[in-house]
Image: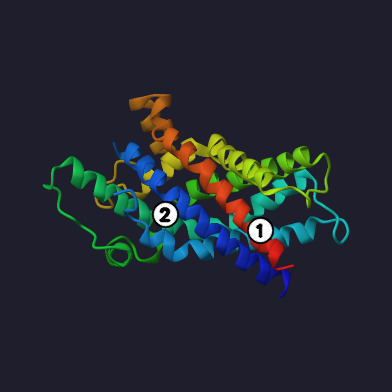
Amino acid sequence: MGDVAKDLTAGTVGGAAQLICGHPFDTIKLQKVRGVLYKGMGAPLATVAAFNAVLFTVRGQMETLLRSAPDVPLTVSQQVVAGAGAGVAVSFLACPTELIKCRLQAQSALATAGSGTVAIKYGGPMDVARHVLQSEGGARGLFKGLVPTFAREVPGNAAMFGVYEALKQYLAGGQDTSSLGRGSLILAGGLAGASFWVSVYPTDVVKSVLQIDDYKNPKFSGSMDAFRKILKTEGVKGLYKGFGPAMARSVPANAACFLAYEVTRSSLG
């Protein structure tokens, strides 16, 4: 099995572990942003394999390009570059997937707040996609929020993979991290996931409010407008709504993801 196939397989397994551990917390986070823990899971479950397969495969190919010689471990700075490159690639998949997820979760939160008086607009992930394609500008509508998605995924993944590699090397006492145990991988993966949100959380809030904004009567004209209005009306704390649940999700979810990836990748040779 080639390296690409190994990364695809290991990334798929890692993504499934991440979703199972983290989705309930993600639902709580989005409800905090807007004001059933597995509501809206269909869309990410249907694409989690592709998302994480792309993330780890592109990162793997970036490692090959950056590596000075075969089998030579990458430096932390090189892993930062590899993570940033992977972030560019996954943004194109993350944007429409998360738009669908955000719409479903926000709808659930509004229906609950309205004590059943809010009409249910979407019947599921495919219904959201059909509505957006038919009524919100076609395929372009599915990529609403692409700019803040880039602004989240590129620096976020750069930080995450950089921190992951730095912690592994610290725990291993050098660049050779092949002998690290599962406990060390869990620790490094969990803290690396936390570093993702620490570095980009306000960007994620902007992305979420844009993606659930009304198409016909929008509150925001774009990313900067959303940022300014949130800051003006709610202050800095408005940019960190749901930060607690996001961090609570990120540590176990990414610990599970990286462990599952590493174990699967190692078992494939």
Q: Amino acid at mark 2?
A: Glu
Q: Residues within 10 Å of mark 1 (few under 14, many from 20)?
A: some
Q: Amino acid at mark 1?
A: Val
Residue at x-position 67% and y-position 46%: 185
**Quadrant of residue 169 within the rendered picture:** top right
Residue 72 tag number = none
**Quadrant of residue 189 within the rendered picture:** top right
Q: Residues within 10 Å of mark 2 (few under 14, many from 20)?
A: many
Whether residue 209 appears in this view of the structure is: no
**In the figure, is residue 138 to the left or right of 246?**
left
Q: Secondary structure at mark 1?
A: helix
Residue farthest bottom in this picture: 1
Question: From mark 1 to mark 2, how far is it between C-alphas?
Answer: 28 Å
Quadrant of the image for the N terminus?
bottom right
**In the figure, is residue 115 to the left or right of 24?**
left
Whether residue 124 appears in this view of the structure is: yes
The image position of residue 74, as x and y in percent, is 80, 50
Which residue occupies the foreground of this view, 15 or 217?
15
Residue at x-position 37% and y-position 31%: 230
Residue at x-position 46% and y-position 64%: 47
Q: Secondary structure at mark 2?
A: helix
The image position of residue 176, as x and y in percent, is 83, 48
Quadrant of the image for the C terminus?
bottom right
For marks 1 and 2, give the one nearer the viewer. 1
The image position of residue 71, as x and y in percent, is 85, 59
Question: Colour scheme used in the picture?
Answer: rainbow
**Residue corresponding to mark 1:** 263
**Residue corresponding to mark 2:** 98
Residue farthest left in this picture: 117
